[in-house]
Image (cartoon, grey):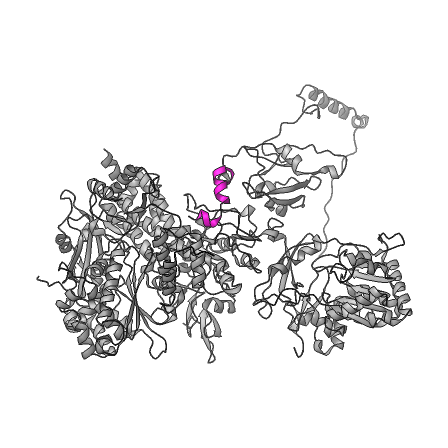
Amino acid sequence: MPVKGMPVRRPQTPGLLSTTYLPSIFKGMWITLRHIFRPKVTMQYPEEKWTLPDNYRGLPVLVKDDDGRTKCVACFLCEYVCPPKAITIQAREITTGVEKGPRTFDINMLRCIMCGYCEEVCPEQAIFLSKTYNLVGVSREQMIFDKEKLLEMGGVRHDPIRKWGRLLDPVGAARAAAPASEAGR
Amino acid sequence: MSLPVSTETDRQIDGLLGRFPQRGSALLPALHLIQAEKGHIPLEAMDYIAGKIGVSPAFVAGVVSFYTMFQQTPIGRHHIQVCCTLPCALRGAGSVMGYLERKLGIRRGGTTPDGKFTLSAVECLGACDTAPMFQINEEEYGQLDERRIDAILASLK
Amino acid sequence: MAYDKLLTRNLGKPNSATLDAYQASGGYQGLRRVFKEFTPEKFVEEVKASGLRGRGGAGFPAGVKWGFLPKGLEVPRYLCVNADESEPGTFKDRLLIEQDPHLVLEGIIASAWAIGCHTAFFYIRGEFHKGARIFQKAIEEAYAKGLLGRNILGSGFDLDLIVYRGAGAYICGEETALLESLEGKRGLPRIKPPFPAVVGLYGCPTIINNVETLANVTLIAERGAAWFAAIGRPKNTGPKLFCVSGHVARPGVYEAPLGIPMKELIEMAGGMMRPDRPLKAVVPGGSSMKILPAAKCDVLMDFDSLAAAGTSLGSAGMFVMDSGTCMVDALWNVCRFYAHESCGQCTPCREGTGWFVKILKRLERGDGVPDDVELLDNVASRVEGNTICPFGEAVAWPVQSYVKEFRDEFQEHVTRRGCPLAAAAAR
Amino acid sequence: MPDPTPPLPPAGPDEVALLIDDRPVVVRKGTTVLRAAEAAGLLIPHYCYHPGLSIAGNCRMCLIEIDKVPKLQIGCATAATQGMVVRTATPRVKTAREGIMEFLLINHPLDCPICDQAGECRLQQYEAAYGAGTSRFTDEKVHWPKRYDIGRSVVFDAERCIKCTRCIRFCDEISKSRELALFQRGDHAIIGTFPGKPLDNPYSGNTVDVCPVGALTWKPFRFKARVWFLRDVPSACAGCARGCNVNLGTYRNRVHRMTPRANLEVNRYWMCDAGRQSYAALTEQPRFERPLARPATDASEPIPWDEAVERAAALLREAVAAGADGVAAIVSARLSLEDLHVTQRALQAIGIGRVAVAPHEEGQDDHLLLRRDKTPNARGAALVGLGAPNAGRVKEILEDVSSGRVRGLLVVGEDPIGDGLIPASDLRRLPALVAIDWWKSPTVEAAGVALPACGYGEWEGTLVNFEGRAQRCRAALKPQGETEPVWRILAALARPFGFGAEYASASAVFDEAAAGIPALAGMSYRSLGTGGAKLKGA
């Protein structure tokens, strides 16, 4: 089958005025002039700070509950789900209240992509994406945030559900630690 | 090692061991004997009887905890067992229990400070014709009302 | 209809529990007759022909059960007498044990002879202190007179009978749990099959019969199958002890032939306790059986008629409730019983019974939600039929029937946030 | 219309044929429906049933429908009969299972985030597969003690327990220690021990394995790693002559737990607690990662491999040159068959004729698994020609070391100083002491040259258990530092003495051994598989 071409329209040869570029210059000047009187949109960062929306996804942080307890119980779900493998946890046994907590909890912020999977998967409501976006450091090591730093960033977050309430109050905890044969009576 | 039961009970238990086609059957009668002597079944006695019969102490403790008549801790001299199951409840077991709780000043499951009475709510004792009723140790008392309860309790030392 | 008392004939006579009094009124003649006129096999056939159905609750023909024993095995056979009478509303066996133990004992000896058993156990519930004492005494009397032990009445038959006391567990009335308990273990029902007639006590073939059933065997021994079968109604033969309790004027055990109308029994018990409160419902066979509302109470009290009415004769522990009874409260009480008595072995019963109590407590206290009524029914349906032993049905049936027959009353507990009857009583 | 049910296959005299979900299956008489379904490739969910334990029938999860039987039956206790028609996925069965799941979970604390069982928990698996996914239970749960020390190595969480009684049955039937029992009844039933008699038997860890939920957890493994991260490497335990089949659960190049792997001919479903914790030595004992040599200053210093092998060979050459009687070797029966085979050949090449294999014995053979012989490969040592472990020969050699008759000693995987067989000073006096071991033992520290070997879990090899069963150990970890397998070290050590064989892998060593040893004839790594194989004539 023969191929059929299509004629392309070429621009006309420019007129005399156009070759002086004056119309374009005035047009541009006009746009600039107009913008002088419009409201300013440029933000003077870092003197000025942006007001972030509530669903902004910044750096992940750990939180404590109203009683000052680290909410994380080291279930490792965030480590498991984290797409870039930014989270590294080591668990430890706690002898009072909830049995388990993180010994170490490191997030490599260079790897973190702020996807929010960790927040979503967390069964304890212990990790949240904060509104912190300015991430600075002078070495790779500094960009690995440890548990203390993450907790400091997260602070206290109110949670109306006291999931471990029974184990955390002294009576319940005492009962929970009683030997089975005696508690059975 | 001293026996956790009297020599008389020990002798009776030895008699029980050969009585059944299998030794294990002696457990319940032996526990009844121990409870008759001690008023309850102490841990040492469970260990002792486990050795006699050839089962583990844990097994014996499991059996003891299964049957409600076996007491694992000491109770009062007079064990008032108020039947609270439906046929008795229909005829006022609730108010009998309430009256006893007020009169003795203890809740169900409790023992008076002088160790005289233990009050328990129990399930059907098979005497629904005399409802409401209770059993004190091995004796039954039916057709209870407040006056009768007063008289019964007064007659107990 | 004039009816001569058979099972309760000796009741009220002086010293009715003694061997002398029993023999004076013709006792142990039936046993002598059996030894003389029958072979064991023939006597099993006689009991089959009598149509005697077990009086413990299931109503299974006693002779047929005996026939299940495997033949030709060189192992002992055992007879266990189920005197673990614990079904709420039932107190008939206790009456027989305390007042006429030899009537039962005679039946035990005849039955043991028929099935070829030389060691029998009398498993009596631990709370029956008096009954155990009386029966033990009866056994001692019988040994002294050659009615137990070696060569009974010159027949060449040997039998030892041991009284075994339970220690407070309803579940031990279930026959395999009874065997476990007899072996000195926790009373956990066994998986069936194998049935006890094949693998029972100590792994040997075992027959378990109710006290009243064996008392009836005495009657058959005395007067024969044909006479026995003429009492009552077809397939529901013989005399029966009915326990009437609850809101009647004179609660007690009443003997009547099977098939007596329920209303007549209530009349025998003196009618309703309070004339101002009419009949509301009757549970005909102990608390495990389905409840009948007053409208359905025109039934005959026998196995088949009650089955047709959607419930069961059970242990004939019949309790009567008047219009002042709150059905939610009553069911809560029943479920507390079952939660307390569940052996805890298998999942649906262990977890289900406790759940019922929690739901019913909420309903009665006024914290129920509309879905709770349906939830009760649905949970019961998931317990029923899925457990090791019939305990599952024993708790599911009352729950299902109370909810079915009195659904409005249950709903009212939700809508009025509490018990209307309790509220009325408080006013 | 054709008959919708497929025809039954023919069954032999001891067999029955039945249909399970329309799949025809033939099984031996007496087989339960649950096992028959397994044979047909169908899983009937269950909690209380365990193939190594008696049947309890209490969880009720395996309820199935059988044609012409009105009530649902439990698959674990119902025997298959000829012509039986079983259905495992009818609406009735599904409703019953959903009910059981709901019942099991109403009093369950649902504390999966802190539960070690999460990830391999039957409650999670079956709820996902058969549960309703939601709960209608809004009341207060029954509360029980959590984190209760029920025994030396086991922690009990009563709230998670589903009372399947597998652990009780294990203690009654298998370990026969009978520490556990069920207490109370109803929904207050609880597993427990007699006060003062905790769960403490040599097999207590198996109760943790059989627990289908997280009620029993193993203390050393508690919170170490989530199970979904673990990679299970099939291997054999090297703790004693039994050679229990195990899985090494590894994560981030560390073994975190050892669990038994079913092998009906060796360990069935079980293993002992000592074996279960044997992996811990690898991290608890001090390792040395680069070859050490003792210079004149008496302080051991790491040196490169080439130099170390050269120096070790030089030491041995000198000693051999002074008289073959003056050189000896002590070899461990804890080494793999491959190591021992190359050792045997290397010793010949070097010219060391005096060899002793060291025995290690402790305790007694017991009724279940534990063996008095703590060396896992004594049979292997005999097989390759090194001889059976012999305490007398070890003693003779060491006496000659003390008296100065032996001037050169090669110690492979043994620690005579640590075992108290010889004073450290006597060994230190030796002009030529070459030690090969995986940890920094006192003997290694006394050696003129010490060469670091891989530890258990790092090497690949074969062990022959006391019954003559060859079983493979797989490498689960990357070797630490510069450690090498023993066979490679000895091949290198013997090379200056004219030893020509080159091996690419442990598998190649095994093939050579199998070609030369009649009892191994025809075996290869492939034929050993995961279950091992009996030696010819064993």
Residue B145 coordinates in the image, percent (x, y): 20, 42
Residue D503 can be seen, yes or no: no
Image: magenta residue range = A167-185
Question: In the rendered structure, does residue A4 fall within the stretch colored magenta?
Answer: no
D363 vs D386: above or below? above
Query: Left or right: where does residue C262 sit relative to residue D394?
Result: left
Q: Residue at x 59, y 50 (%)?
A: D222
Residue D537 coordinates in the image, percent (x, y): 66, 79
Residue D389 coordinates in the image, percent (x, y): 72, 70
D456 vs A116: above or below? below
- Seen as rendered, the residue at the extreme left is C2
D435 vs C75: above or below? above
Please name whichever residue, B124 or D230, is drawn nearer the observer in this view of the structure: B124
Query: Left or right: where does residue D340 sit relative to residue C412?
Result: right
Q: Residue at x 50, y 64 (%)?
A: D173
Please name whichever residue, D242 or D363, is drawn nearer the observer in this view of the structure: D363
Of the 4 image quadrants, the one containing the N terminus of chain C is bottom left
Please name whichever residue, B107 or D530, is drawn nearer the observer in this view of the structure: B107
Of the 4 image quadrants, the one containing the C terminus of chain C is top left
Residue A112 coordinates in the image, percent (x, y): 67, 41
The secondary structure making up most of the magenta span is: helix
Give the total number of marks visible in the rendering. Answer: 0
Q: Residue at x 39, y 64 (%)?
A: B14
Question: In the rendered structure, does residue A182 fall within the stretch colored magenta?
Answer: yes
Query: Left or right: where does residue C189 sit relative to residue D531?
Result: left
Residue C410 can be seen, yes or no: yes
